[in-house]
Image: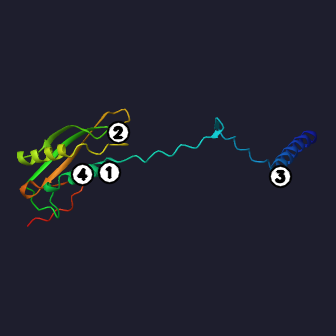
């Protein structure tokens, strides 16, 4: 490279370095915050954060407590026996307000236990509302629950049931 071009390139690079250093040395004030949005002279307050999404397990626990509170004469407490006389699985459908719209036995081998489970659910209505579950446009929600029966058709609900005793 000949000397005149080298001088021009060096001069150009030196100018860039000086411009960069000058820009770094000056501090620009931070931008001013935007003026508060006002509606009729009243400052708008921020919207509260949406409530955390509720889980199906938490909802089922609320429903189980609700059913047990409304059927105390049908509940047994304590450890589950090693052999349960009856197990009834039901499909429960509720609307947005918690109204029971349908309940069907999905699995059972004991008609008497099935009738107790269905009657206990119907007697418990309305159930807690399924707030925060499912799509907002859905009018109904269906879930399953299991009734674990001990003697004399007394039950625990699986969602809240404790451990089962080991067999003999």
Residue placed under numbered mark 3 in the picture: 25
Q: Earlier in the sequence, mark 4 or mark 3?
A: 3
Q: CA distance from mark 1 to mark 4?
A: 10 Å
Q: Reply above or below: 75 against 38.
A: below
The residues tagged by marks 2 and 3 sit, at their Cα atoms, a distance apart of 56 Å
N-terminal of the pair, mark 2 or mark 3, is 3
Q: Earlier in the sequence, mark 1 or mark 4?
A: 1
Q: Is residue 69 above or below residue 77?
A: above
Quarter residue 127 falls in: top left
What residue does disc 1 label? Answer: 58
Figure quadrant of residue 73:
bottom left
Q: Which residue is mark 2?
A: 134
Q: Which residue is labeled 4 in the image? A: 64
Q: Badge 1: few (under 14), some or many (20 or more) residues near its Cα, within 10 Å?
A: few
Q: Quadrant of the N terminus?
A: top right
Find the distance from the CA under tag 1 to the CA under tag 2: 13 Å
The quadrant of the rendering that contains the C terminus is bottom left
Nearer-the-camera pick, 101 or 26:
101
Check disc 3: other Cα within 10 Å, few if <14, some if 14-19, many if 20+. few
Q: Are marks 1 and 2 in contact (CB under 8 Å)?
A: no
- For the residues labelled 1 and 4, say whether their Cβ atoms are less than 8 Å apart: no
């Amino acid at each position: 490279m000949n000397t005149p071009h080298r001088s021009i390139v060096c001069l150009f690079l030196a100018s860039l370095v000086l411009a960069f250093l000058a820009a770094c040395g000056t501090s620009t004030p931070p931008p001013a915050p935007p003026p508060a949005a006002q509606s009729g002279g009243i400052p708008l307050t921020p919207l509260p954060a949406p409530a955390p999404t509720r889980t199906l397990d938490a909802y089922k626990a609320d429903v189980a407590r609700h059913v047990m509170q409304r059927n105390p004469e049908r509940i047994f407490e304590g450890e589950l026996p090693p052999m349960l006389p009856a197990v009834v699985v039901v499909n429960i459908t509720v609307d947005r307000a918690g109204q029971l719209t349908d309940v069907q036995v999905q699995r059972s081998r004991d008609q008497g236990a099935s009738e107790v489970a269905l009657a206990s659910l119907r007697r418990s209505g309305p159930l807690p509302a399924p707030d925060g579950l499912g799509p907002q446009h859905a009018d109904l929600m269906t879930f399953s629950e299991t009734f674990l029966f001990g003697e004399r058709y007394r039950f625990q609900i699986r969602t809240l049931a404790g451990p089962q005793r080991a067999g003999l």
